Image (tube, helix red, strand yellow):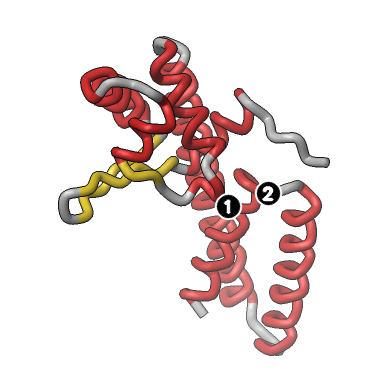
Amino acid sequence: MQDYVTEYRNKCVNLWTDAPRDELHDAMNILERAFARAERTLGNTNERERTICQVGRMQGILQVFKQLIREESKDADVTELMDRHDENVDKIMQAMHGHEGHLNMRHAELLRTTGLSKDDLSDAMGHILMAGAMECYRMGKDILYVLTKAGRRYCEKRWPRDKT
């Protein structure tokens, strides 16, 4: 049960930060029904047990708000650091944003896409990685770059995609 609660809490946070509000609303309705079902399954409970359940709910709410604050803080950090950038950072972020699915892009592919020199790419990537907008992974001889959730949200705000 604890895994279910943790999984659902994380799902709600992800829906809050990344999805349309109607999806969050649907998830909240499902969660309310699950709580009602759990209360019926428990049957008659005494005052102490009900209090313990309420304290657990309050603790869950607190954890969700802490996660939301951390996500908003990441967004603010990315925005603040990215606003102090040069045009090379813009080229890289737009290339990653335009890349299908935001999955990843290899270093060589990013060089080709942006037309930057190796030194310019490395300098700008240092800034982007420090801002928390991307992560990088070494795969053999390749370096793989991936937009973080905060990086994706930054790109969506800066260069919104046409939803039609």
Identify the residue shown where x is 44% and y is 41%.
Answer: 147
Q: Residues within 10 Å of mark 2 (few under 14, many from 20)?
A: few
Residue 11 or residue 124, whichever sits in front: 124
Local SS, label 1: helix
Q: Amino acid at mark 1?
A: Asn
Residue 54 in percent (x, y) is at 61, 64
Q: Amino acid at mark 2?
A: Ala
Residue 42 or residue 164, whichever sits in front: 164
Judging by the rendered image, the residue that carries numbered circle 2 is 19
> Which quadrant holds residue 153?
top right
The image shows residue 23, relative to residue 75, as above or below, that is below
Identify the residue shown where x is 75% and y is 70%.
Answer: 30
The image shows residue 162, relative to residue 106, as above or below, that is above
Local SS, label 2: loop
Identify the residue shown where x is 55% and y is 47%.
Answer: 100
Residue 19 in percent (x, y) is at 68, 49
Residue 7 in percent (x, y) is at 52, 68
- Numbered tag placed on residue 14 in the rendering: 1
Identify the residue shown where x is 30% and y is 46%.
Answer: 144
